Image (tube, coloured by chain):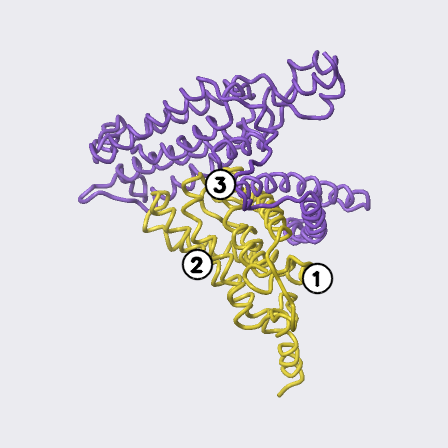
Chain colours: A yellow, B purple
Amino acid sequence: MSTTSMIDSATAKKNRGVWKKEAGEIRKPGLAHFVMMALFTGVGVVVGTFGSMAVSLGPVSAFWPGQAIQSVGCIWYGGWGAIAGIVFPLISNAISGQAALPISIAYIPGNLAQAVVGAWAFHVFNCDPRLKSTKDWVVYIIFGIIIANAIGAAEGNLVLYSFGIITSEAIPLSFLGWFLGNSVASGILGVIMLKFLSPLVMKTKTFCKGVWA
Amino acid sequence: MSIASEGAATAKSGMWDSEAVGTGVKSRRAASHKMVKTMLGFIPEDSPISYFHPTARLISYLFMSFLPLVFQTPELQLLLIAISIATYAWAGIPAKNLKTYSPMMVLIFLFIGIEYVFFPATGAGETPIMVGAVALYLSSLLRGLLVYTRVIALLFASIVYFSTNRERDILVALRTLHVPFAVSYFFGLVLRSAGTFIEDYHIVREAEKARGLDMSTAPFFTKVTHFPMYMIPLFTLAIRRSEDISMGLYAKGTVLIQKDKSKKRPDFIRTFYHSKPADYLLTAAITAIFVICWIMSIYYGAFSLSSSIFNPLFGSII
C-alpha cells in the first residue's frame, strides 16, 4: 500500500465522525435551520439569476452555477438544502427571464435530483464535505457534478421537449451543451464552496448530520 | 397632519421608507414624483396598478402564466404579449426598461429559430423549400413561431408581475390567501436575503477596488475563476446573519407552526390593504376567461394551430 493511499484510508476512517452523531448528541430541527434555508435560498436566487443572465442560450441552461448551490446546500443542510434547491430556481428563473413559471415548475424533479444526488453519495460513502481525501473529491465529481447534472440535463431537455421548445432531433445536442456547461460552472463553484466554506459551516448548529438536523 | 400620522398615511399608500416618514412636508411635495422599488426596478408611487389588491395581482399573474399553454395559435400569444406590454406601460414604467430583456428575447428567437430550421418537426409527406443547402419545412417554421410567441408571452407575464410588485406585495397576497405562516415567512426571508446578498456583494466589490483590484480589465477566464471566490466572504456574512435572525426570532418567541389555532397571529402589514369591488371583478374575470378557454381548448378543440390565421400564410400545411 502506498503512502498516499494509507493516508487516504486513515483520513476516511477519521471522517466517519462527520456524519455520525456523538454519544448522547441530540440534534433537532429548529428555527435556525429554517432561517438558514431561507437565506441559502436567497443566495441561490442571486447566484442563479446572475448565472442565467451572464451566459445564456435562451431557454437552455448553458453555464448555470446554481447547481453548485443545490448540491453543496444539500450536503451541508440536508433536507433544508433540498427545499432551497427546489425553490430558488423558481424565483431566479422568473427574475432572469430564463424560464416561465410553468416551465420552472416542471423543472422541479430535475432540480431535486441535482440537489440530493451528491448529498446522498456523501452520506453513503462517508465523505467529508471539506474534501480532505481523494475519495471525497472523486465522489463529489462523479455524484455531485457528473451524475447530478446528467439527470438535470436529461429532465430539463425532456421538459423543453414537452413544452415544444426543442424538437426531438435537437435533444442530444441540447443535452450535451446543458450538461457540459453546467458541469463546468457548478464544478468550479462547488469545489470552492466545499473546500473553503465547509470548515466554517460544519461548526455551525445548522449543519445537518442527518436529513433535518 | 403630524409626522406620525403622515407616516401612517404614507405606509397606507404603500411607501415605507423611513425617509418619507421623517421628512414631513418635503415628502408630501415630492410624493407625485416618488418611485417605489419593485422586484425588478421602480414603479411610480401613484401607479394605477397599485389600486388593485396584491392578491388580485398575484392571481392575475398565475392565470397569465398558464393561459399561453392553453392557446395553440401565435396570434393569441401575440395578443397576450400586447396585453402584458400595455399593462407595463399603464403601470407607468418607462418602456425603455424592457430593453434589459431584449438580449434574452433575441437569444430565445435565435435558439428556437435554429432549432426548428436545422432540427425540424415535419409533417408527413411534407416537401421542403430549399434555400441553398438548407431545407425549410413550413410546418416546422409555424410550430417554431408558436413556441417562440408562447415563451415570450410566458416571460412577459413574469416580467410585468415582478416589475410592478414589491416583496411586501407578494407577502400580503400570500397571507391574504391564507398560505401557512411558515411558507409566507420563508418567502419574505428569501426575498429580503436576496437583496442583502446583493448589497454585500457590492460592499465586497468596493473593498476590492479600495485595495486596487480592478476586475473590469481582467481577462475573461480570470473573471470566471474569480467570481466563485466572492462566495467565501458572502456566505460567511450570510451564516452570521442567519444566526442573528434566528436568535432574534427566538428572543421574540416566534413559532413557525402554531399549535393553538384559536389564537390569531398579528398581521400588521395586511391592515394597510383592503379589497375593493374592482379586485373581485378582476379576479373573477381572469378566472372565468381561463376556465372558458381551457374548457374550449380541451373539449372543443378550439385555439388549435390548424385554425390559426398564420396557417394559410404558411401554405395551410397543418
Quadrant of the drawing holding the N terminus of chain B: top right
The crowd level at tag 2 (other Cα within 10 Å; few <14, some 14-19, many 20+) is: some
Q: Earlier in the sequence, mark 3 or mark 1?
A: 3
Amino acid type, callout 2? Ile
Q: Which residue is mark 1?
A: A203
Q: Is residue B81 left or right of residue B203?
A: left
Element at badge 3?
Answer: loop
Q: Which mark is residue B317?
A: none
* Kind of residue at badge 3: Gln
Up the image or down, B299 lies above or below A194; here it is above
Q: Secondary structure at mark 2?
A: helix
Mark pair 2, 3: CA separation: 19 Å
> Do residues under tags 3 and 1 come within 8 Å of each other at their CB atoms?
no
Q: Which mark is residue A151?
A: 2
Task: Count the marks.
Answer: 3
Instruction: Please check whether the numbered discs 2 and 1 fall on a single chain.
Output: yes
Is residue B112 depicted above or below A119 in this figure?
above
Chain letter behind tag 2: A
| Label 1: chain letter | A
Q: In this rendering, would A146 be left or right of B150?
A: right
Residue B142 is situated, as x and y percent measured from the top left of the image, at: 29, 35
Residue placed farthest to the left in the image? B125
SS for callout 1? loop
Between A158 and A211, the residue placed more toward the observer is: A211
Residue at 70% x, 20% y is: B7
Cα–Cα span, label 3 and label 1 = 36 Å
Tell me residue B58's x, y (percent).
47, 30
User: Which kind of residue does numbered mark 1 sit on?
Assistant: Lys
Q: Earlier in the sequence, mark 2 or mark 1?
A: 2
Residue denoted by label 3: A98
Seen in the picture, residue B135 relative to A205 is either above or below; the reply is above
- Residue B300 falls left or right of residue A23: left
